[in-house]
Image (cartoon, rainbow, N blue to C red):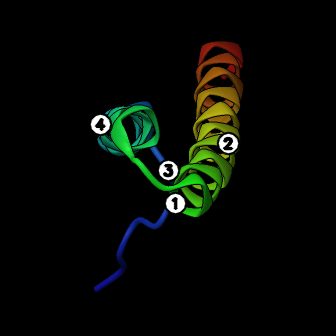
Amino acid sequence: MEVNKRNTPAKLTLFCVIYAVIIIINSLLVINSPHLFVRVLNLIVVIALSIVIGAFIREIFILRNAESSE
């Protein structure tokens, strides 16, 4: 039995939505945190997760172009 490990646009969109929720929660923590260290650490996490979402969105566009060219 073979398992299809190829990413689909639906799967990548789901991951983007999940990461977007995590980014929103961490952004609220950055805004409401009283400690500077926690703010800086959460801000670094928000930036890193934003990079990941950008990579997923790029993959979605690449998959759509590949599917439309086939």
- Outermost residue, bottom side: 1
Task: Give SS at disc 3.
Answer: loop
Judged by depth in the image, the label closer to the viewer, 1 or 4, is 1
Judged by depth in the image, the label closer to the viewer, 4 or 3, is 4
Q: Residue 50's spot in the image, x, y percent?
A: 62, 37
Q: Residue 41's spot in the image, x, y percent?
A: 61, 60
Quick check: 57 left or right of 30?
A: right
4 vs 56, nearest the viewer? 56
Residues at marks 4 and 2 touching, judged by CB atoms closer than 8 Å: no
* Residue found at x 42% / y 32%: 31
Q: Quadrant of the C terminus?
A: top right
* Residue found at x 29% / y 36%: 21
51 vs 58, nearest the viewer? 51
Q: What is the quadrant of residue 18 in the picture?
A: top left
- Look at mark 3 in the image and give the residue it sits on: 7
Q: Residue 43's spot in the image, x, y percent?
A: 61, 45
- Look at mark 2 in the image and give the residue it sits on: 47
Q: Quadrant of the N terminus?
A: bottom left
Q: CA distance from mark 4 to mark 2?
A: 14 Å
Looking at the picture, which amino acid does disc 3 mark? Asn
Residues at marks 2 and 1 touching, judged by CB atoms closer than 8 Å: no
Q: CA distance from mark 2 to mark 3?
A: 24 Å
- Above or below for 18 versus 66: below
Task: Give SS at disc 4.
Answer: helix
Q: CA distance from mark 2 to mark 1?
A: 14 Å
Task: Give SS at disc 1.
Answer: helix
> Mark 4 packing: few (<14 Cα in 10 Å), some, or many (20+)?
few
Looking at the picture, which amino acid does disc 1 mark? Val
Looking at the picture, which amino acid does disc 4 mark? Val
